Image (tube, rainbow, N blue to C red):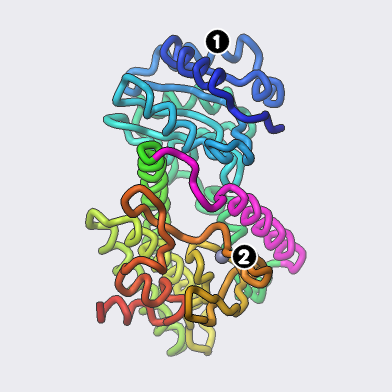
Amino acid sequence: MSSEQISDATIAEIEQELAGDGVWIDPAFARSHDISAADEARIEDAVATAQDSNLKVVLIEVDIDDERFQGSFTSLSAWLQDSAAEPDATYVGWEEWSEPSLSLQEFGDQPEAIYVANVANHEHPDAVVDQVVRVAELLDDGNAEDLWHEVPSDERYSWTADEGLQTSEVVVGIGVLAALVAVVRALVVWRRRRRLRPSGFTLPATVLHTVRSAEDRRLRQQAEAEVLALGEAIGRGDSGGTAAALEAWQQALDHYAAARSILAQDAAPADVVGALVLARRGEDARASAEERGSTAWEPPVHCWFNPLHTGPTAEVVWRDDDRAVDVPACAACAGDVRAGREPDDVLDFIQGDRTVHYFRLDLGPWSRTGYGALERDLLGALRRR
Ligand SMILES: [Zn+2]
């Protein structure tokens, strides 16, 4: 259920409630998620008794067509934080991004929130009130990361696991029907994702920066989680078998090492994206090695417009100023290019007060190779940087 634009009057009301008991629940959200007055009181209690964090709960489904926030809870929380008097706060809200779920944004000196929403969501699926109450406990206990690692890996990321389904896995015996379901699901995820990222941000520069730093943090968390998962999978596996498998295993190790060394530094957002790309390639190489096949591993091709786009690609001709380049593009981006439009979820970074497409920036091997989309040997390009 989507509400209309979040008006200035509503923003003022949210700010007032947050300054009071720290909880604001949109009436339409309460109706669609079956939240009673007693439930709201439970949430207010949890916020009041939170020890270590300054919790702000804002439950609303931000509409994709909302002019200011464009479907993003991250943007809404950044906006609220920008005008709040307190420098430190953790916002708990509802993110429609990819899969609708509870989301946390920390600002300033607040307890580490990594894995907190994941654990709450895993323990109380589809029970948003229980999730919020659990978030408050987890932030105080500070044990979310440990709890998350106790969750069996196949239960962790249901949709990323689906999205990552590769042809090779289909071959080793997952049913074709399951594969089709996964592909359809991945398509839904893309569609949502790209609708949430319209071109041309309308937020003021200060809010743009706050939003971006929240997004950068989330990206970094995701990169750390995926690199960690790759390390664990490598630790559990063993090399051996064919020469091709040994070679793929070495590639997995090399990609893992490169991704880790990037994240070990205070990496810029463009480098964090690079680490994520390396981790995904490393995972692909690892999976290929475990199949012990006889064909040499090749890095998977990804979308040139945004290396984080998943799924099969097709070649398109991209005309930019006076040049025309053949580039691989995911289904969504290829569709846009063929229709004569610029894809609306191109990877971009902040420069000054605006966002710029990554390929118009000088990011060394990242922009030169399109994060490996144009020159497949990304590790080689990095070594030559
Ligand atoms: Zn794409």
Which residue is denoted by mark 2 in the rendering? 341
Q: Amino acid at mark 1?
A: Ala
Please state which of residues 329 and 232 is positioned toward the viewer in this rendering: 329
Disc ID at residue 41: 1
Q: Is mark 2 within 8 Å of ligand 1?
A: no
Query: Horizontal placement of 24 versus 147: left or right?
Result: right
Secondary structure of the residue carrying tag 1 is: helix
Using the image, determine if residue 150 lies above or below residue 17: below
The C terminus lies in quadrant: bottom left
| Label located before the other in sequence (2 or 1) | 1
Query: Horizontal placement of 274 versus 99: left or right?
Result: left
Residue pictured at 70% horizontal, 65% vertical = 179
Please state which of residues 174 and 214 is positioned toward the viewer in this rendering: 214
Number of marks present in the image shown? 2
Q: Which residues are magenta?
A: 175-204
Secondary structure of the residue carrying tag 2 is: loop
Residue 382, percent from left and from top? 29, 76
- Crowd band around label 2 with a 10 angstrom C-alpha radius: few (<14), some (14–19), many (20+): few
- Please, what is the dominant secondary structure of the magenta stretch? helix
Image quarter for ligand 1 equals: bottom right
- Crowd band around label 1 with a 10 angstrom C-alpha radius: few (<14), some (14–19), many (20+): few
Q: Amino acid at mark 2?
A: Arg
Residue 186 is covered by the magenta coloring: yes
Using the image, determine if residue 50 lies above or below residue 242: above
